[in-house]
């Protein structure tokens, strides 16, 4: 190959390499953006209504969006890491050691070892990032209390799959179960996480607490989770001395209606 052709091929290879790195950069930015949007949705958003037909639709759509955002974050990270760690780079960018090995060593065997190492590194790093993502921010669902009442999965996306499926069946069938509740009142279900931080060679201990509104009976047993707004309205309307008939949707356990027993 003439020097001119060699220089042209080399320039073309570098241009291809630059294009690949730009794609990798965009993939990484997209992954970070998907991760941030997913976390913000977990932290900042909760259904405004959780009772009646509107509540079923709200919880269904909320769960669907949560699943989509969660999968988008996970897939984006997988694609970004895959492009960075698994894609073979162009020949002009090999190191001096690679050049010597290509000339004198067993290049074929080393290629297999390098590929296996890259795959193993990708799996381990992605596994670590996936676990970090699952435990980051709000580690319980926005439907934490209702999830515990219905004994749905403790894993984030799986619990939302359960909510999406159960609310869809309730919207389709509309079946309810009547429960009589004495001493009905709105209580607060909460979960706290300890936070330890270092500052000026000292440790500071605090806690992060998330609260959820629930309808409880006189024995403080959780009956059904409601939204914060609904909880405030019910708190003003309920009389703990009276008995109420609460109708719960068959599959999701969300509240369809509540009426004073005559």
Image (cartoon, rainbow, N blue to C red):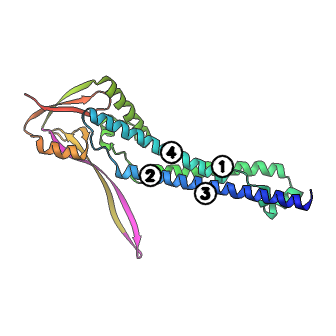
Q: Quadrant of residue 66?
A: top left
Marks 3/2: CA distance?
18 Å
Q: Nearer the viewer, mark 3 or mark 1?
A: 3
Marks 4/1: CA distance?
23 Å
Where does residue 214 sit, x and y in percent of width and height? 23, 42
Where does residue 131 sit, x and y in percent of width and height? 50, 49
Marks 3/4: CA distance?
17 Å
Which sits earlier in the primary sequence, circle 4 or circle 1? 4
Taking 201 as reference, is 214 left or right?
Answer: left
Secondary element type, mark 1: helix
Secondary element type, mark 2: helix
Which sits earlier in the primary sequence, circle 2 or circle 1? 2
- Given contact means CB atoms under 8 Å apart, are the residues at marks 3 and 2 in contact? no
Residue 25, numbered label: 3
Give the extent of the magenta segment: 183-203
Marks 3/1: CA distance?
22 Å
Reading the image, the residue beneath label 2 is 37
Front position in the image: 254 or 31: 31
Residue 164, numbered label: none
Front position in the image: 249 or 199: 249
Write the residue at 39% across / 49% down: 42
Indicate whether 83 appears above or below 250: below
Marks 2/4: CA distance?
10 Å
Reading the image, the residue beneath label 4 is 72
Q: Quadrant of residue 199?
A: bottom left
Residue 120, numbered label: 1
Secondary element type, mark 4: helix
């Amino acid at each position: 190959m003439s020097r001119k052709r060699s220089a042209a091929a080399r320039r073309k290879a570098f241009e291809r390499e630059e294009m690949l790195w730009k794609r990798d950069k965009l993939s990484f930015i997209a992954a970070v953006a998907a991760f941030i949007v997913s976390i913000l949705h977990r932290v900042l958003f909760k259904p405004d209504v959780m009772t009646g037909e509107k509540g079923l639709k709200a919880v269904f759509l909320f769960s669907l969006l949560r699943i989509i955002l969660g999968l988008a974050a996970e897939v984006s990270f997988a694609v970004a890491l895959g492009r960075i760690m698994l894609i073979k780079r162009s020949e002009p960018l090999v190191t001096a050691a690679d050049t010597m090995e290509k000339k004198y060593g067993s290049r074929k065997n080393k290629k297999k070892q390098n590929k296996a190492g890259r795959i193993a590194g990708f799996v381990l790093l992605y596994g670590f990032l996936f676990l970090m993502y699952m435990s980051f921010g709000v580690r319980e669902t926005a439907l934490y209390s209702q999830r515990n009442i219905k004994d749905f999965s403790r894993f984030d996306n799986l619990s939302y799959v359960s909510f999406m499926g159960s609310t869809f069946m309730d919207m389709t069938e509309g079946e309810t179960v009547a429960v009589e509740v004495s001493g009905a009142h709105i209580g607060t279900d909460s979960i706290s996480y300890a936070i330890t931080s270092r500052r000026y060679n000292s440790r500071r201990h605090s806690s992060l607490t998330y609260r959820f509104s629930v309808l409880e009976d006189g024995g403080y047993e959780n009956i059904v989770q409601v939204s914060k707004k609904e909880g405030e309205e019910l708190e003003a309307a309920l009389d703990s001395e009276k008995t109420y008939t609460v109708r719960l949707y068959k599959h999701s356990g969300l509240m369809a209606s509540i009426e004073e027993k005559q």
